[in-house]
């Protein structure tokens, strides 16, 4: 892999700032660009604050040194000059992605990877007509990326295997956990898994089988406790004496019944969605959202630190 550790972060909202912290703490030189001047001006200070927060949990060794590797570029062309990697974090609009990647393909060095953080738009929708389309792919993170390391890599049919392999190596090097989605699918993998659980949650709460708060307890103090360090396939391997084949023989009859009557799209519409909203006992005030976000990030940082320490032991 090239020793060129220069990255352009295009769009420095929440996700872009997180990526900036991730690359900077890993020793990369980070150039920031954003068409919204106030957002761009505020970004370096906010990223520095986040690096110090990571340091408090042992997740960033030298926050000031990392912050010193972050610069604000005067233009998109300046941001991508001489970089080996571009992480794009623009609006979730396909027409915006098409325009941005056309610019990036023109301006970035021909060997630089062009990666989008999009969570909902497959790469073939915005890279088809590009000369350098073989180096374009999706690198979908989980919010907040600096505390949840997973990143889903998914190329278009014309993305070269070498581009995906190189992106995977870079993400591993900067401390993330890359997974490869072998071919394009709507929602990639994480959101499809999340969507399946969320649809059932909406049905169970909306139809009165369980309260909204008890539903959340079921996940965070039940399924989620295992899932924070084991996947669902690892989980079922331990739930039958003979592992996964034994589990399939013993229990899939029950799951076939559930799958045959799975929650449909109507769970997200009125009247069911109205019942779910009414069942949640909290009002989404700005104060509550801000307080809860801070609490979530602190808990995630503590969990991330624990998992890092477990790997070392």
Image (tube, rainbow, N blue to C red):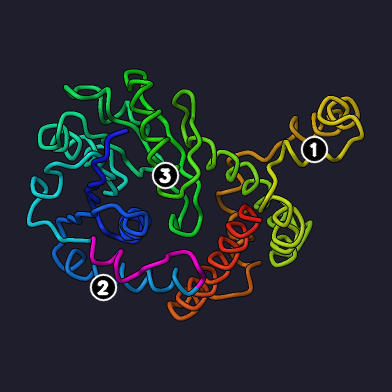
Residue 255: % across, % down: 80, 33
Between 296 and 135, the residue placed more toward the observer is 135
Mark 3, residue position = 173
Q: Nearer the viewer, mark 3 or mark 2?
A: 3
**Does 214 sit above or below residue 159?**
below
User: Is 139 included in the stretch rendered in magenta?
Assistant: no
Mark 2, residue position = 45
Residue 229: % across, % down: 67, 50
Query: What whole-number distance in Å separates the C-alpha atoms at marks 3 and 2?
Result: 25 Å
Between 26 and 93, the residue placed more toward the observer is 26
Query: What whole-number distance in Å separates the C-alpha atoms at marks 1 and 3?
Result: 31 Å
Residue 286: % across, % down: 43, 77
Please report whichever mark, 1 or 3, sits nearer to the chain's N-terminal start: 3
Which residue appears farthest toward the top when viewing the image? 158
Residue 36: % across, % down: 16, 61
Task: Please tell me the numbered disc located at residue 236.
Answer: 1
Which residue appears farthest toward the bottom when viewing the image? 287
Is the residue marked by circle 2 packed among few (<14), some (14-19), or many (20+) residues within 10 Å? Answer: few
Q: Is residue 143 left or right of residue 209?
A: left
């Amino acid at each position: 892999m090239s020793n060129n550790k220069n990255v352009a972060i295009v769009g420095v909202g929440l996700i872009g700032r997180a990526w900036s912290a991730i690359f900077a703490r890993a020793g990369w030189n980070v150039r920031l660009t954003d068409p919204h001047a106030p957002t761009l001006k505020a970004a370096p200070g906010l990223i520095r604050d986040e690096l110090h927060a990571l340091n408090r949990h042992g997740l960033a060794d030298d926050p000031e040194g990392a912050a010193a590797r972050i610069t604000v570029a005067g233009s998109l062309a300046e941001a991508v000059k001489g970089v080996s990697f571009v992480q794009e974090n623009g609006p979730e609009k396909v027409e915006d992605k098409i325009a941005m990647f056309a610019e990036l393909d023109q301006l970035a060095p021909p060997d630089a990877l062009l990666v989008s953080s999009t969570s909902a738009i497959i790469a073939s929708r915005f890279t088809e007509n590009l000369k350098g389309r073989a180096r374009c792919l999706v690198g979908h993170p989980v919010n907040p990326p600096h505390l949840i390391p997973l990143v889903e890599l998914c190329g278009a049919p014309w993305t070269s295997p070498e581009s995906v392999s190189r992106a995977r190596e870079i993400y591993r090097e900067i401390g993330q956990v890359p997974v490869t989605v072998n071919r394009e699918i709507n929602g990639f993998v994480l959101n499809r898994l999340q969507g399946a659980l969320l649809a059932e949650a909406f049905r169970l709460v909306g139809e009165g089988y369980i309260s909204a708060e008890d539903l959340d307890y079921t996940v965070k103090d039940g399924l989620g406790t295992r899932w924070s360090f084991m996947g669902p396939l690892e989980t079922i391997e331990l739930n039958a004496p003979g592992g996964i084949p034994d589990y399939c023989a013993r229990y899939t009859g029950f799951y076939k019944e559930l799958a045959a009557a799975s929650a449909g799209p109507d769970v997200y519409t009125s009247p069911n969605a109205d019942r779910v909203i009414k069942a949640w006992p909290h009002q989404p005030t700005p104060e509550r959202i801000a307080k809860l976000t801070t609490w979530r990030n602190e808990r995630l940082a503590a969990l991330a630190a624990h998992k890092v320490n477990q790997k070392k032991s």
